[in-house]
Amino acid sequence: MNLVQIENVSKRFGDFTAVDNVSFNIEKGSVYGLLGPNGAGKTTTIRMIMNIIAPDSGAVIFDGNGKSGDFADQIGYLPEERGLYRKMKVKDVVFFMAELRGMDRAAAFNEIDRWLQKMDLVEWEDKKIEELSKGMAQKIQFIATVIHKPELIILDEPFSGLDPINMTLLKDLMLELNTNGATIIFSTHIMEQAERLCEKICLVNAGKIVLEGDLREIKKSFGKSSVEIEYSGNVDLIRNSRYVESCNDYGQYVEVKLRAPEHYSALLRELVEASVDITRFELMEPTLHEIFVQSVRGEGRQPHAA
């Protein structure tokens, strides 16, 4: 069942079209990637889902029967542009956010204590926000986003400014929330993060959908056009092959982009006949980054209809 339906939504600001006739559905309990470069229209789409701004045309339907604005207490939103009251103490600002979402005092303080422990921030609860590092402040804002146990969690570039340890912590918490039933919209321009976390994705560029659907099916449809080769000998024999489009040499192995997926057997035969000593020849799935670049440049499949 779909929690969010985006139906033929467009948004313009003057002569600029930020979102152009976009449609997609987000299933309950999924981790959905809203992906694309900066300026692609992701944040504008999120703001329409949040009912912060209204679409010029089309509709955003929440839980099958209304606007998301009617279900504000069931949504948690971590915006890309962070905003906490810098003069307030940590515990006070989170409590304030919890009250805005309708939580009673006792439940709010119980959840605050639990989350501060999970985030290893207990000793900072009486510090002012302005005394925190950027990473600490981001963790506080994450707590404020999920404190009221929302059904839909929207995270816009949630890993920005975090070190690797806290990125792992936040990733684990996202998956825990999802396991417990939350639906998550994960918006980012970093494809590697989305590839690890998302089941379905919507790639947007210049306000239009480039690709949309199940990530595994999208990757499968692009075929395996990359090969990793471990070898000894002259890399020029690989680089200059008529079957090779590009070649990244790492000394003991190379990453090869084939001119066409079906060229892998011909390349292997050519190298064996040239007496290249090959210890590994492995077909690789394209990365989400490679798929996006190909699609935006028009080198891949035609955009999949949402």
Image: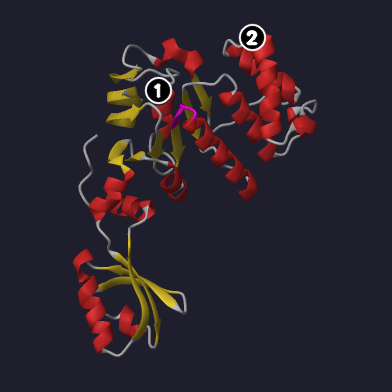
Q: Position of residue 54 (x, y in %)?
A: 37, 17
Above or below, 223 relative to 47: below
> Mark 2 highlights which residue?
104
Considering depth in this image, is 19 or 187 the residue closer to the camera?
187
Q: How is the image coloured?
A: secondary structure
Residue at x 39%, y 88% (from the top left corner) = 233
Looking at the rendered image, the quarter that the C terminus falls into is top left
Mark sitting earlier along the chain (2/1): 1
Q: CA distance from mark 2 to mark 1?
A: 26 Å
User: Can see residue 85?
Assistant: no
> Mark 1 highlights which residue?
49
In the picture provided, is 173 more to the left or to the right than 301? right
Label 2: state its secondary structure: loop
Whether the magenta-drawn stretch holds residue 182 is answered as: yes
Q: Residue furthest bottom?
A: 275
Image marks 2 and 1: residues in contact by CB distance under 8 Å = no
Q: Which residues are magenta?
A: 180-184
Q: Quadrant of residue 137?
A: top right
Whether the magenta-drawn stretch holds residue 268 is answered as: no
In the picture provided, is 31 more to the left or to the right than 102? left
Q: Main secondary structure of the magenta part?
A: loop
Q: Position of residue 119 (x, y in %)?
A: 67, 35
Label 1: state its secondary structure: helix
In the picture provided, is 204 more to the left or to the right than 269? right
Considering depth in this image, is 225 or 265 the residue closer to the camera?
265
Above or below, 256 relative to 215: below
Q: Say which amino acid is labelled 1.
A: Ile
Q: Position of residue 284 (x, y in %)?
A: 34, 63
Q: Position of residue 214 (x, y in %)?
A: 30, 41
Q: Say which amino acid is labelled 2.
A: Asp
Residue at x 20%, y 76% (from the top left corner) = 266
